[in-house]
Amino acid sequence: MFRRTDRAAWLRWTTVAATVGAVTSAGVSATAADEHTPVDCRGNPSALQPAIAAAAQGATLSVRGRCIGPFTIGKSLTLVGRGQAVLDGNRAGTAVTISGAVHVRLNRLTVTGGQGSKGGGILNAGGALTMDHSTVTRNTSSSTGGGIRNEGTLTVQFSSVHDNTARTLGGGLDNVGPGGRLLVIRSTVHHNTSDQVDGGGIFNDGTATVDFSVVSGNRAPVGSGGGIRDTGVSGRLTLNGTVVRDNTAAGVGGGVSVGAPAVATLNHSQVRNNSAGTAGGGINVDGGALTVKRTRVVGNTPNNCAPTGAVPGCIG
């Protein structure tokens, strides 16, 4: 959860309102789209995938219990959890795969038990996905995106992505450019790990905006960017009112690592108490472009920023 200092920082920053419109496909009546179809996995753990297959475009499924997957969603749907609803990948593949140009909302759900090659918990393969008041935890990927791999449009709001592991890139989130567009609002990305390469919390080579959130306790035990790694031709990263703290990297950029030719902007944020094995405990810039506005970079090890002069106004 957020520390008191993080909460206080939030209160000083302007509130961002995120409005996500309901999507109804052509030819589906408003009545059909508004219906809530109950799916009770307490008595039948395998009930959800058949319900997804049978649902009309734009329908809402009201989910209870622990549903055993993995699951594939190839149409526009809303899944709403009732009680402590869980989507469990059962270590049989990516827990939830969003397939095609569809609009999907996951509301008040926990996604866990995924074990995939691209995206352990969730693979958004070109759709528009909104996660609202949900959790992605304890998923693994043999490649990228331990928690989520996003190849489309992803909004994570009032949610948590934590304790996921990727073998290579993006222990928590892998936002894939140039089509990947990621928006994180008032959420936490914490205690994720990229085992062998970069981006313990978030790996971005698309367009990523992180607003009023906390990225903490993530690890890149071999590579760089313990909290966030922003790189590539399409890499565009913006942090607004966000705290990046207590992340670690064996290489450079314990908090934030910006690689060529990516661009990053930090506004009214904090980068503190992160550590790197070689340089840039807080922020490291290796060929990319970084703009920092009213952002505190303090208490990082072995230094706050590297190389010297790469981050204007950053000392040590």
Image: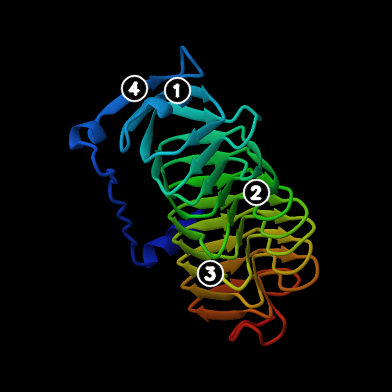
Q: Are marks 4 and 1 in contact (CB under 8 Å)?
A: no
Question: Which numbered circle lies on residue 50?
Answer: 1
Q: Disc 3 versus disc 2: distance between alpha carbons?
A: 19 Å
x, y percent for residue 195: 75, 51
Residue 229 location, quadrant: bottom right
Q: Disc 2 versus disc 4: distance between alpha carbons?
A: 33 Å
Q: Disc 1 versus disc 3: distance between alpha carbons?
A: 39 Å
Question: Which numbered circle lies on residue 38?
Answer: 4
Amino acid of disc 2: Asn
Q: In the displayed structure, would residue 14 be above or below residue 71?
A: below
Give the mark, 1 or 3, whose residue is nearer the N terminus.
Answer: 1
Q: Is residue 124 left or right of residue 130?
A: right
Q: Are marks 1 and 3 in contact (CB under 8 Å)?
A: no
Q: Residue at x 51, y 73 (%)?
A: 266
- Near mark 2 (Cα within 10 A), the count class, few <14, some 14-19 or many ≥20, is many
Q: Disc 2 versus disc 1: distance between alpha carbons?
A: 32 Å
Q: Is residue 205 left or right of residue 167?
A: left
Residue at the disc numbered 2: 192
Residue 183 location, quadrant: bottom left
Please, what secondary structure does the residue beneath circle 2 have?
loop
Please, what secondary structure does the residue beneath circle 3 have?
strand
